[in-house]
Amino acid sequence: MMSKLKEVREDLNITQEELAEKSGVSARTIQRIEAGTEPKGYTLKSLAKALGVEEKTLLTENEETRKVDIDVYKLINLSALPFTVVPPLNIIVPLLIMFIKKEFNAITKQLITIQIFWTIIAFIVFMVSSFLKNWLNLNNKFILIVMALLVLSNLFIVIRNAIEIDKEGKLYFQFKFSII
């Protein structure tokens, strides 16, 4: 299997020495990467910049590994579904699966963060709606409607993320921060 770096370099019709000069990375390092070593950090950034490609383009992605990752992401995400009506479990079950599968990466942490954030927001909305019900003398159907809408919102988030994981291998709903 040809390395991604070699593939891109040859497509651009430049030699290892020319790439070394353009990127500031030694020719020997380029040879090692083309022989199978994954580029990291500064080396990865320098090579990507010199070749005019995104960093991820130079990383080797094993299709089998990617399939397993996506299956684990879907499992962690969808494990929250049965527990959308029991908020603490919609966090605990996916978290347990994450620990059992030893998947501690940005996507799995985002999946847990989304459930934690949703649970906090759902609690606040539920409490506010309870006060509103009493304050505005609304009937008990109001609380049931609010609860149903909260559950449906979490179902929508989980299902929409599952669809995006299946199609693109990433999340549709995500934050720029992680709680865990």
Image: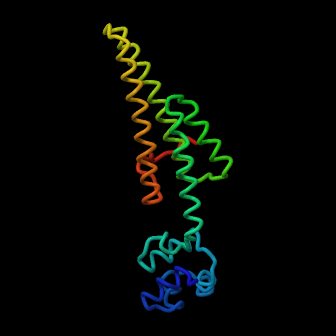
> In the image, is residue 81 above or below residue 11?
above
Residue 65 location (% of width, % of height): 59, 65
Query: Outermost residue, front direction?
Result: 82
> In the image, is residue 33 above or below residue 85?
below
Q: Residue at x 40, y 34 (%)?
A: 152
- In the image, 46 versus 9, the foreground residue is 9
- In the image, 72 versus 49, the foreground residue is 72
Q: Residue at x 57, y 36 (%)?
A: 91
Residue 148 location (% of width, % of height): 40, 27
Query: How many numbered marks appear?
Result: 0
Task: Tell me the colour scheme of the image.
Answer: rainbow
Image quarter hosting the N terminus = bottom right
Residue 81 location (% of width, % of height): 50, 39
Q: Quadrant of residue 2?
A: bottom right
> In the image, is residue 126 above or below residue 138?
below
Q: Residue at x 63, y 86 (%)?
A: 28
Q: Residue at x 31, y 9 (%)?
A: 136
- 162 sits to left or right of 35: left
> In the image, is residue 9 above or below residue 75?
below
Image quarter hosting the C terminus = top right
Residue 170 location (% of width, % of height): 46, 56
